[in-house]
Image (cartoon, rainbow, N blue to C red):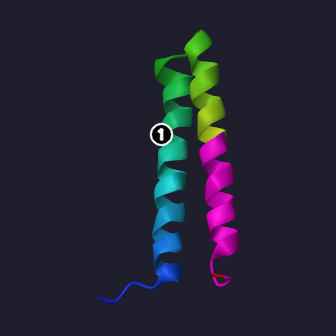
């Protein structure tokens, strides 16, 4: 299976979205005190990076 740059960016986007959802879930349900805000902020950051990866698909 040949993987080009767009395929790698697609997989990276999917992985970043999954990790972002897991971090937001941890912040909301597991660590719902002060640490939860940090987990949620990092999860939102993962979404932002995934958005950039998705925007780069087709341009690289």
Can you say whether 44 is above or below 60 in the image?
Answer: above
Position of the N terminus by quadrant: bottom left
Q: Main secondary structure of the magenta part?
A: helix
Q: Position of residue 58 (x, y in %)?
A: 64, 84
For image coordinates 47% across by 39% down, the residue present is: 22
Q: Is 2 on the left-hand or right-hand side of 40?
A: left
Can you say whether 35 is above or below 58 in the image?
Answer: above
What is the residue that sits farthest to the left in this orientation? 1
What is the residue that sits farthest to the top in this orientation? 33
What is the residue that sits farthest to the bottom in this orientation? 2
Query: Which element type, helix, strand or loop, lies under badge 1?
Result: helix
Q: Position of residue 46 (x, y in %)?
A: 60, 46
For image coordinates 54% across by 44% down, the residue present is: 20
**Residue 3 part of the magenta-drawn span:** no
**Residue 52 part of the magenta-drawn span:** yes
Q: Position of residue 48 (x, y in %)?
A: 69, 51
Can you say whether 46 is above or below 50 in the image?
Answer: above
Position of the C terminus by quadrant: bottom right
**Residue segment shown in magenta:** 45-59
For image coordinates 48% across by 28% down, the residue present is: 26
For image coordinates 56% across by 15% down, the residue present is: 35
Q: Is 32 on the left-hand or right-hand side of 59?
A: left
Instruction: Bin the neighbour count of mark 1 within 10 Å (Cα to Cα): few under 14, some 14-19, many 20 and up.
Output: some
Q: Which residue is mark 1?
A: 22
Give the total number of marks visible in the rendering: 1
Q: Position of residue 23 (x, y in %)?
A: 51, 35
| Residue 3, image quadrant | bottom left
């Amino acid at each position: 299976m040949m993987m080009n740059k767009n395929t790698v960016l697609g997989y990276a986007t999917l992985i970043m979205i999954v990790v972002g959802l897991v971090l937001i879930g941890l912040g909301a349900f597991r660590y719902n005190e002060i640490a939860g805000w940090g987990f949620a902020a990092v999860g939102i950051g993962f979404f932002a990076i995934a958005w950039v990866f998705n925007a780069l698909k087709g341009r690289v």
